[in-house]
């Protein structure tokens, strides 16, 4: 069964993360949608995609089995609303919106209409993070740092720190009671820390936007075990005898970082007629709103 799937927005994330995964699939009839005519022509030719649209409504008129939204965060609500109202199963890059209120509105609409809505938190599908979750250890510590990218707090939290927030929720289910600390200078967020606790677990997430390095590290520990994962590529198990596992030379970045399995999760639901709910993803957005309010009042 060939699925007609729209890719809406053809910017950096679509090019780096999604096209290498979706482009080669013979079971998909891809549809490109972007107002950037140059990108539309370039990528249409590169990936041999014939269905090219500068407007979403013309793509909808041809009929879609599903859609993936990669456009800028600011336009997510309008695009996702249009897709849900048209009854099109939708997966959207995080965040659903840059605030909890708009996110709630979209999730409520999807639930009311009975339409699939999924938020693309790829780390939940990254093999090394799934393996870490299976260890079921009581302490989680995650860092996701940037070299020199202090920015407005809401943009940082909803566009980037949201990955940390959602990964903590994934690895420490039941941990709540959020505590937030951070440093905002002249309106720019330099660093933020979030701690969650409960159900026998503790989780700490940190992002430093002026750290001097672009890096991601995750540690899970307890019960005599400790695992450290660096950039989703290196796994260090520490104990009586340390071991180091690196990503295999033939393992794709899309597989390593969870995009391959995440896309398949969405597409298999479309193919099978199963509805996906974004209610749990909404909790991540609500927690992000709490973080923003604690940082800026």
Image (cartoon, rainbow, N blue to C red):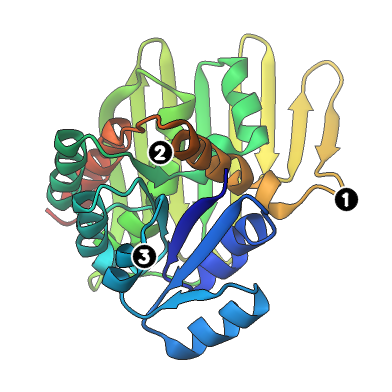
Measuring from the top left, give residue 73's x and y in whole percent.
Answer: 31, 64
Q: Specify whether residue 14 is in view.
A: yes
For residue 249, the mark is 1
**Does the CB distance between marks 1 and 3 fall below 8 Å?**
no
The quarter of the picture where residue 217 lies is top right
Q: Relative to residue 118, is residue 143 drawn left or right?
A: right
Element class at badge 2: helix
Please state which of the two labelled residues, at mark 2 or mark 3, is closer to the viewer: 3
In depth, the one of 92 and 239 nearer the eye is 92
Q: Please report whichever mark, 1 or 2, sits nearer to the chain's N-terminal start.
A: 2
Measuring from the top left, give residue 220's x and y in whole percent.
Answer: 59, 26
In depth, the one of 228 and 114 nearer the eye is 114
Please state which of the two labelled residues, at mark 1 or mark 3, is closer to the viewer: 3
The quarter of the picture where residue 16 lies is bottom right
Element class at badge 1: loop
Q: Residue at x 62, y 49 (%)?
A: 27
Disc 3 marks which residue?
62
Give the vertical position of 267 relative to 5 (above or below). above
Q: Relative to residue 67, is residue 145 drawn left or right?
A: right
For residue 2, the mark is none
Give the vertical position of 146 relative to 263 (above or below). below
Rounded to the nearest angstrom, the CA distance separating label 1 from label 2 is 29 Å
Measuring from the top left, give residue 25's x and y in whole percent.
Answer: 67, 54
Rounded to the nearest angstrom, the CA distance separating label 2 from label 3 is 35 Å
Q: Residues within 10 Å of mark 3 (few under 14, many from 20)?
A: few
Disc 2 marks which residue?
166
Q: Please report whichever mark, 2 or 3, sits nearer to the chain's N-terminal start.
A: 3
Rounded to the nearest angstrom, the CA distance separating label 1 from label 3 is 41 Å
Q: Specify whether residue 213 is in view.
A: no
The quarter of the picture where residue 248 lies is top right
Q: Quadrant of the N terminus?
A: top right
Q: Residue at x 61, y 39 (%)?
A: 126
């Amino acid at each position: 069964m060939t699925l007609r799937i729209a890719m809406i927005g053809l910017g950096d994330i679509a090019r780096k993360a999604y096209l290498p995964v979706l482009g080669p699939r013979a079971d998909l009839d891809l549809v490109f949608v972007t107002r950037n005519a140059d990108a539309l022509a370039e990528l249409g030719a590169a990936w041999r995609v014939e269905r090219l649209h500068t407007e979403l409504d013309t793509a909808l008129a041809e009929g879609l089995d599903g859609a993936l939204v990669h456009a800028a965060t600011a336009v997510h609500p309008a695009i996702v609303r249009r897709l849900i109202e048209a009854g099109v199963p939708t997966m959207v890059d995080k965040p659903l919106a840059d605030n909890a209120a708009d996110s709630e509105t979209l999730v409520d609409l999807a639930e009311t209409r009975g339409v699939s809505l999924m938020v693309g938190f790829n780390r939940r599908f990254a093999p090394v993070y799934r393996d870490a979750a299976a260890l079921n250890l009581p302490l989680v510590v995650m860092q996701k740092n940037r070299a020199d990218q202090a920015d407005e707090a809401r943009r940082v939290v909803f566009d980037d720190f949201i990955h940390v927030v959602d990964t903590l929720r994934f690895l420490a289910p039941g941990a709540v009671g959020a505590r937030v600390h951070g440093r905002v200078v002249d309106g720019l967020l330099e660093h933020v820390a979030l701690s969650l606790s409960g159900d026998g677990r503790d989780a700490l997430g940190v992002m430093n936007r002026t750290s001097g390095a672009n890096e991601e590290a995750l540690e899970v520990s307890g019960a005599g075990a400790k695992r450290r994962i660096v950039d989703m590529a290196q796994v260090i198990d520490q104990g009586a005898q340390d071991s180091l596992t690196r990503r295999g030379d033939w393992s794709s970045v899309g597989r390593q970082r969870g995009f391959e399995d995440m896309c398949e999760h969405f597409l298999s639901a479309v193919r099978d007629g199963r509805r996906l709910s974004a209610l749990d993803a909404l909790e991540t957005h609500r927690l992000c709103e709490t973080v923003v309010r604690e940082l800026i009042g």
